[in-house]
Amino acid sequence: MSAKKMRGYSRRRFLNLFGGSIAVPFVLGALSSRAAGLAGKLVMIKGPHSADEAKFEAEIIADFKKGNPGVDVEFTTYDWANMNAQLTAGFASGSPPDVQYLVDLIYPAYAERGVLQDMTTWVNDPAWKSERDAIAPFAWSLAKSSKGIWGVPVLGAVYNIFVNLDLLNAAGVAGTWQKSYADMMAAAKATTKGDTFGVSLRTRVSDFAFWDWFPYIHNAGADILNKDWSGHGLAGGEDAMQFLIDLHKAKVTPPVGSVDWQGQFDLFKAGKIAIYHGETPQINELLASPPPFKWDVAYAPPGPKGQTVMGNFGILSIAAASKNKDAAWAFIKHWASGPEVGRFAGEVNLQVVRTDIVNQLYGDKPQMQKIQKEFVPRVKGVQPHPKILTMLQQIWPVAEDSYLGNLTGNDAIAQMGEIINRLV
Amino acid sequence: MAATPSQFSAIEHQTRRASAALRRDLTAYAFLAPILLFFIVFMALPVVWLFYLSFQNDGILAPARFAGLDNWRRTFADRLVLKCIGNTLYYCLIAIPTVFVLGMIVALSLETIRRGAAILRVIIYFPTLQASLIVALIWTFMIHPDFGLLNIVIRAATGVKMNFLGNPASAMPTIAMIEVWKGLGFWAILFLSGLLALPLDLYHAAELDGAGPVRRFFSLTLPLMKPTFYFAVIFATIVNLQLFDSVFVLTDGGPVNSTATIAWYIYRSLFTFSDPGFGATLSFVLVIVVVSLTALQSWLMRARV
Amino acid sequence: MPGRPSRLALEPSAAARWLAALVLIVTAIISLAPFFYVVSTSFKETRSLFTYPPHWFPDPIYFGNYLALFEKHPFGWWLANTLLVSSVVTVLKFFIDGMAAYALAKLDFRGKRLVVTALLVSVAIPLAALLIPLFLIVRSLGIIDTRIALILPPLANPLGVFMIRAFIAGVPDELIQSARMDGAGEFEILRRVVVPLIRPGLVVHATFIFSNQYTSFLWPLVAVRDTQKQVITVGISSLRAIFTVDWGLISAASLIAAIPLTVIFILFQRAFFQQSLAGALKE
């Protein structure tokens, strides 16, 4: 080609490229200004996961404001111990917080009463597909019912076991305790001496003791409700129940109800418990003030039908009475996005339900990484029935009674089943 | 000269009396107006609404669905309701006499001592001023099996570690002990104020008659304190039948529902169970229990006078 | 209390005084000793309630908990709100309950039975049951999430009325009758005749109302959401994060919260005993 033609050609290309590169920001600007067209006020409510909760939320809100300067987000908390009273009052007021962090135990009751916004259309929006798929399927199943999708799952806490490796090694059972229930019992007996106990599990109602009980029931293929939620599904859990009863009978645990969960953790930190049923955020404390022994995280031995881990999860929901639902949805998407939820989870030591960021989290905390990668996939959570919390709280006294030695596993399961059937 | 009745006809008499009665009623209601105003708005109206709610399902978050006598029937069929009533009465039976006897002893002692009494009064009243959360914290420490003060003492005496809140048999008495500790100051001060108001001349006379302090206590002090005790029993019953705070913070009804009180079950039904109709019904059950018990007490105490 | 004639034989015997002193010292120890661990914990940096073995004395002494209360949380607001609300309620209740109690104790009027029964029965209704309807009413009045919402509903509680009524019942009817015959209006009688005689009772009432209001929890929890308008009990409860309870922080908070209440109590008690001393001397 002649030099002149070449110059013209490249000039045109240059102009095209140049024009294009001007156009792109314009188009982007137009698009984002449509998003930035979101305005108004949002109130978000959540229970505190750390003493610095407000600070961490402020970080998330600041990032959100960069893309949505027209939206004012106010963050407020509820008190975990009184969460039901505060949330119910909020809904009853007619102007509840727009975005609410609800745990799996309580959101179904609110959903059933129609105070939560069904988010199906938003969640299934093709533009959000890649984000939606990044969240594990089991988490989505916790957030939906036959009538809709009630929130975006974001965080979880796994109820893992902590083991005192020194105690287990001294008794020679470190390698075997996790093989079967019988082995766990033997290990517990071998490590119980003096004021040291082999095992501890929660027993008090006020400690939500059923979380420690669940994996054993799930490992037997049982659950609170049966497959179609028409009745109880505890059949098959008798042996698991009996095992737990036997643990208490064998006096390898602190006397039933004598110490609360925090007290058990204190005992573990002092080296007085070999196998402690705890939860992941406690890892933070163990790392901050390392105990005088080697420890690790673990899950319960396998049962006849599986080896599961228990966890409980929280979703971000929108109040049906919210007046700014579009902004609320935008904020939820932002909160649940990889960088935001990942940073928050790292700050408060909780698990995420996104599968795409697991490798970038908890860089300096191998136990948290282990739990995120090995335990979370094994999680079998609660069934999100509107009366699930009621059922759990009403059956727990039966468990307490059996731990005290007044009921056998069969009796306990039978009584629990009756209570559940009456409530369904 | 003052008007004599004969100066008025029978009709004039009646009108005079009627207008006097009206004036009297108006005065009385003028005195009652403030409390009645607030009472109607903030107490009576909610109670009426609560009564309406007891015949519905839901009604707080979801729209109410008429349920007829369903809630009431469930109340009578629910075994936990009976257990709650039993627990609450058991608690009152242990706590009230204990705190009265101890309170009276402390009140008498405060009255006897002159120097230093002011500081002692403040110290003794201090527990009453605390909020439930901190009382729970304090007592979690006190009853801890290994390092709790109480268990240290008990272990020194008997070599056994007591499981205060874990044992269904001892849980309610433990809560009673905590509430007695908390309430002692209040009752001591109340009884003290009653003691200080007693007329001295009767005591001088009794002393002159040769009655010793013990005799004076039983024949003079106790009978003269009747109005104070009368009020105290009713007040204590009403307040203690509504026991909730300690149970909520310490045991949440456990173990095995041995500390489940009526007020606790009401709170549970309303918020955790999201069963407001049932909670409303239970509230009226509590009212019935309280009213019956206080009426019974009134009758018994009046009979003694 | 110098020179006050005692009811017990003008002068209690030495034995009686020793016994009383013993009782009081034991009671004081039982009342106060449990707080020792709270005080100790408030000066520790630890978050656990117990360490094994327990450190009875903080070492080193840590003031961070107390600082954190004011730096990280609106603790000052909580205290101020609680004092404001409690004081206003106590003052208002003084008038409201006092007047109502006088009417119930010394006036006869039509409908008295009904009023007494209604007030008496309502005392039996647990606050938990009234939370939601009260909330809805307060919201419809447009005062939800304000301090007014904390002040108005407690004014309806009739418990104080019955307390003062019991004290007024002890005032002899003859005094009232003679005042009436002297031409005094009922309000004047209440003010000039009754109130001076029941001063100790009024102080008991004020103490009760004030401390009740100061420690009330459920209603402020539900009625107020703005943390700056919140009261101290709800504030302290909110210091609990979900998994770890910072006992050091909560201990510090509870101790500071107890100070204003204790000071007010001391002032009330001085008034109480000043009056009863004056009353006894008048005799």
Image (cartoon, rainbow, N blue to C red):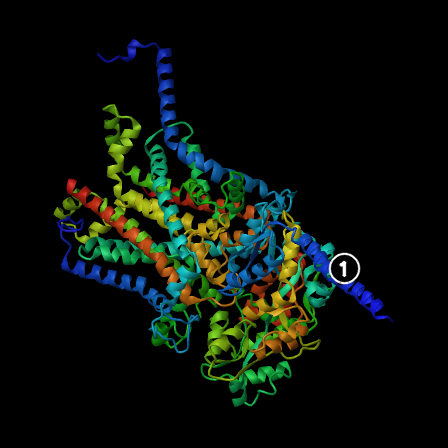
Q: Position of residue B124 (x, y in %)?
A: 29, 58
| Picture quarter with the N terminus of chain B | top left
Classify 10 Å Cα crowding around label 1: few (below 14), some (14-19), many (20 and above): few
Q: Would residue A387 be visible to someone looking at this image?
A: no
A364 up-or-down from C136: above or below: below
Q: Position of residue C203 (x, y in %)?
A: 29, 45
Q: Position of residue B176 (x, y in %)?
A: 41, 59
SS at circle 1: helix
Left or right position of A387 against C77 = right
Q: For the residue marked with disc 1, what is the amino acid? A: Pro
- Residue assigned mark 1: A126
A266 up-or-down from B54: above or below: below
The front one of B297 and C243 is: C243
Within the image, what quadrant is residue A221 found in? bottom right
Within the image, what quadrant is residue B96 found in? bottom left
Q: Position of residue C66 (x, y in %)?
A: 37, 63
